[in-house]
Amino acid sequence: MSTGVDHTTETTTPRSAWVALTVLMLPVMLIAVDNTVLTFALPLIAADFRPPATTQLWIVDVYALVLAALLVAMGSLGDRIGRRRLLLIGTSGFAVVSVAAAFSPTAETLVAARALLGVFGAMLMPSTLSLLRNIFVNASARRLAIAIWASGFTAGSALGPIVGGVLLQHFHWGAVFLIAVPILLPLLILAPRLVPESRDPNPGPLDPISVLLSLAAMLPIVWAIKTAAHDGISTAVVVAALIGVTSAAMFIRRQNRSATPMLDMKLFSSGPFSSSILANFLSIVGLIGFLFFISQHLQLVLGLSPLTAGLVTLPGAVVSVIGGLAVVKLAKRFAPYTLMTAGLLLVAAGFLMILLFRHNLSVIAVVISFIVLELGVGMSQTLSNDAIVSSVPPAKSGAASAVSETAYELGAVVGTATLGTIFTAFYRNNVDVPAGLNAAQTSAAAESIGGATSVAATAPQPLAEALMTSARTAFDSGIAPTAIIASTLAVAAAVVVSVSFRRSPVQHADQQEHRTH
């Protein structure tokens, strides 16, 4: 049985390919910065608008919800009209809407701007990964390119809190959205000259019905998950879930019957492809849920500034980059699925360390746990993304990349909605709001730790101290169940990867094409 070890070299890759990679890392860093900087800006947004906890979750989630719903359609569109063209359209729209988001007058306006950012963001990520699939035809070089591409995402995740922290200490929270402009302008100037265009030579027409069915599947399902996690099961939740599942079934049926499907469902018959998608999804559920908690723990429980809180996550981000690059060399000696499994187990270990440190979750404990967790993320994400894009012919890379990104974004939504809601539920059940506050203050303090912090800022000193002591204890009461769930998901992903790759060793699509000629 093949081990899946890659012995190819990268001597055939021209220098222009690596230059194009540099340009394509700009939108990747933007998406990463946008995700993490908002999390660290959320306490200030909450203090400004004082939205309910549900609206706070929507500010974070709506971007990923819309983006996830559109990724498959946009990936297929890029295959048809050109991936570079779609990338430039998305870049222009993202820059304009980022400026609008920065000056949002209400929380509801900010939610709307974030939704529109999701539309243009859906054009960016699958375009970058599919362009890499077509630029790097050599398997070994492509794996290194994907590791560097992933390191751009990790670097953006690390830089987001730091750059955002500096901005948040000197400017209004809207400044965190404006940083998209200087990142995107070089892309608009350089991409037409340095990034080669690619598209499916025989794409077939775009199917509007399939696009609508994909939206009708994703949006209600994600909404049902979010709403059920926060408010419990209701008639509306059940109806939305049924609409989503029915639309998904109709979408799959239509793809299987189409001569030129928007998404080739045969891709999922490959064990490495499907298990890599699942691994991405499960690991991101835990990681995003962790970031949702840790950003608030560092600022609202430990009392760190946004900048200092961002610096706490920096060592883990650096280790993630190192792990992603190192695993490329290790993959020449060990089976990639073995390394991917090891990475997922490290992710689980990071969450278990959070569980062990939960009674004294200091800055040092967070740094150590995050280093272990991010090392695993860097290893597993590099290899899983390589397995996904190398399983398909270059002409279909847009749709495959979109599936990979859909798993990531859906994992982000589910992670925030479920694990974030667990923290909210434990907070509400355990917080003890002291007497002496008015009805509005009591309601806000009982809703979330962000609300309690806002109330404490204007309450008399004795009441403020009593409230914050209770709020911090109540918020941290959700650590144990969340860490257990996240670690269990990572272990489950490791098991699935190990079993599926053993049964069906990864076969690169470019190797298959070579053997047919």
Image (cartoon, helix red, strand yellow):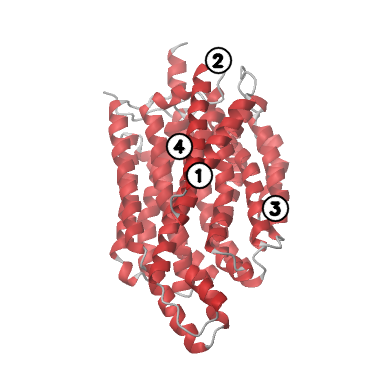
Q: Earlier in the sequence, mark 1 or mark 2?
A: 1
Image depth: mark 2 or mark 4 in front = 2
> Is there a contact, CB below 8 Å, between mark 2 and mark 4?
no
Q: Earlier in the sequence, mark 3 or mark 2?
A: 3
Displayed quadrant of residue 269: top left
Q: Residue at x 45, y 78 (%)?
A: 433
Image depth: mark 1 or mark 2 in front = 1
Foreground pick, 386 / 445: 445
Real-space Cα distance between discs 1 and 2? 29 Å
Real-space Cα distance between discs 2 and 4? 27 Å
Q: Earlier in the sequence, mark 4 or mark 3?
A: 3
Q: Secondary structure at mark 1?
A: helix
Residue receiving disc 2:
259
Q: What label sits on residue 181 in the rendered view?
A: 3
Residue receiving disc 1:
222
Q: Residue 181 at x, y = what percent? A: 70, 52
| Quarter occupied by the N terminus | top left
Foreground pick, 25 / 501: 501
Q: For the residue marked with disc 2, what is the amino acid?
A: Ala
Q: Secondary structure at mark 2?
A: loop
Q: Residue at x 39, y 38 (%)?
A: 278
Q: Is residue 52 above or below residue 78?
A: below
Q: Residue 251 at x, y = what percent? A: 52, 27
Residue receiving disc 4:
385
Real-space Cα distance between discs 1 and 4? 23 Å
Real-space Cα distance between discs 4 and 3? 28 Å
Q: Secondary structure at mark 3?
A: helix
Real-space Cα distance between discs 3 and 2? 41 Å
Q: Residue at x 28, y 64 (%)?
A: 356
> Is there a contact, CB below 8 Å, between mark 3 and mark 2?
no
On the question of residue 248 being in view, the answer is yes
Q: For the residue marked with disc 1, what is the amino acid?
A: Val
